[in-house]
Amino acid sequence: MATSRRNFLRVGALCAIGAGVPAAVVQAGTVKSFGFKENYSKQAFLPYLNSQFFIQGGPLDKVEVVLEKVSDSKTRFGSESFSLLFKDPSASMRLGQSTYVVEHAKGEQFTLFVVPVGKPEVGLYQAVINTK
């Protein structure tokens, strides 16, 4: 069966794009940690209140945020549940709901599922953590 040039280029482009996805996934999984990843406890985040973090929005896009609040959530037996509230000082809502690499200003990294909350002009992001 003969393949047209247009079809060949389309399939080749899709394969090239697909080949880049595993590299991004592997890169996101190999982050350096400084205690958050090992225990993800409320006590690990409390010392970093009002300090600067960066959320990796894309390959060249880091959103600067400040850890504004660490608060308790409802817990089940034997587990800890708390939320982290990050504020974007520029009040730009550039990130959607997704799992991101988060980096502290000192350079240490970990991953969090982050959700934009509130009005877009406020620039708030929340991560809820449940441990067992």
Image (cartoon, helix red, strand yellow):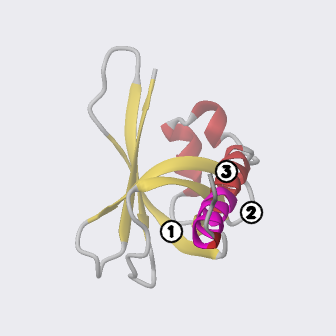
Q: What element carries label 3?
A: helix
Quick one: 60 or 2, which is closer to the camera? 2
Distance from label 3 to label 2 (Cα)? Answer: 18 Å
At horizontal 56% and vertical 74% (from top left) the residue drawn is 64
Kindly identify which residue carries mark 3. 28
**Residue 40: percent from left, percent from top:** 55, 36
Q: What's drawn in magenta, residue-wise?
A: 6-16
In terms of secondary structure, what is the magenta stretch mainly?
A: helix
* Observer-nearest of 40 and 117: 117
**Which dot, 3 or 1, sits closer to the camera?**
3
Mark 3 residue type: Ala
Is 123 or 26 nearer to us in this picture?
A: 26
The local crowd at label 1, few if under 14, some if 14 to 19, many if 20 or more residues have their Cα within 10 Å, is many
Q: Counting other residues with Cα less than 10 Å from the Cα at mark 3, is it few (<14), some (14-19), or many (20 or more)? A: some
Up the image or down, 70 lies above or below 82; here it is: below
Residue lying at 61% horizontally and 67% vertically, measured from the top left:
4
Q: What residue type is labelled 2?
A: Lys
Q: Which of marks 3 and 2 is nearer the N terminus?
A: 3
